[in-house]
Amino acid sequence: MQDKTVYLNGEYVPLSEAKVSVLDRGFLFGDGVYEVIPAYFGKLFCLKAHLQRLSNSLNAIRLDVPFDAEQWLDILQPLLIEGDAQYIYLQITRGVADKRDHAFPEHCEPTIFAMCSAIVPFAREQGVQAITLDDMRWQLCHIKATTLLANILLRQQAVDQECAEAILIKEGYATEGAASNIFVVLNGELITPPISHEILPGITRDVIIELAQANGVSAREEVISLADLQTASEIWLTSSTREILPVTVLDNKPVGDGCVGPVWQTMQTLFQEYKRVA
Ligand code: PDD
């Protein structure tokens, strides 16, 4: 394992020396939130939006971390490593309490951890397979919580069936992927489910909507029924590490003609250009 430098509670240390107490509430309860922030060509991508979402997640779990954008940049920028595409994983837990108790401890210093990894190049042009699964997660999916057991079990079920992702269905509607947002192309129009507590407000999702609208690609936020998903000519998964990933096979059936579609080609070009200038 490469002994890269990571950030832990105010210090930069080799990964092998970064240690957290077993009484950390992140370890005991998954009591924490996180961010995954891509960096292209040495610059953090959409940092402001990621920090805003982090702040929303922290507020939602009632955790106060008084860093402003400049302080976060000072912490994260030195972690960036060589290469065109990397991502920062940033995790904040409620910290170490002296005993295990579900309720918040009276005094606790948050544990702040960050590390940088390469985004592994991926042949998106071939598309991937996905399956639909019942969205059995909790009711606060807008919080980017480290408590990810349901997402993990769903993704693993997909991987067990040689699929890249599980697309989650709640009461007959598609919400998102186990670790991604979803888009479909229906009658030539790009559609993604509206923001709600049922999905994570993806930063990649926002960039795609903005880029589409600025470049004459018809795009709107609308609920996607299972029937829409099954008749869509294109389906994409979007996330900070996978960017825009076309799904060409859903539940063992081809999506559209089973090849990546023209709207994906357009958005892929726009997104790759945007990464260079953002
Ligand atoms: N996951 N929905 C879920 C449930 C996610 O876990 C993610 C990202 C997204 C996409 O969000 P964004 O575009 O901001 O990355 C949507 C990250 C990459 C992860 O957990 O590793």
Image: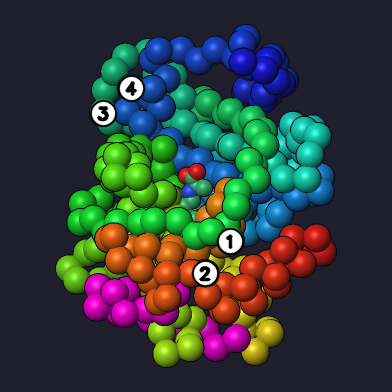
* Colour convention: rainbow
> For the residues carrying marks 3 and 4, which lies nearer the camera in this image?
4
Q: Amino acid at mark 4?
A: Leu
Q: Is residue 277 magenta?
A: no
Pointer 1 and pointer 2: residues touching (CB < 8 Å)? yes
The tag earlier along the polypeptide, 2 or 3, is: 3
**Residue linked to disc 1:** 125
Above or below, comparing residue 121 to residue 236 in the picture: above
Whole-number angstrom distance, CA of label 1 to CA of label 4: 41 Å
The tag earlier along the polypeptide, 1 or 2, is: 1
Q: For this rendering, which residue is in front, 180 or 51?
A: 180
Q: Which mark is residue 260?
A: 2
Q: Residue at x 40, y 13 (%)?
A: 22
Q: Is residue 229 magenta?
A: yes
Q: For this rendering, which residue is in front, 253 or 69?
A: 253
Above or below, comparing residue 176 to residue 217 in the picture: above
Report crowding for label 2: few under 14, some 14 to 19, many 20 or more residues within 10 A (C-alpha).
many
**Residue linked to disc 4:** 28
Q: Amino acid at mark 2?
A: Val
**Residue linked to disc 3:** 102
Q: Amino acid at mark 1?
A: Glu
Q: Element at badge 3? A: loop
Above or below, comparing residue 226 to residue 197 in the picture: below
Q: Residue at x 52, y 75 (%)?
A: 261
Pointer 3 and pointer 4: residues touching (CB < 8 Å)? no
Is residue 134 toward the left or the right of residue 223 in the image? left
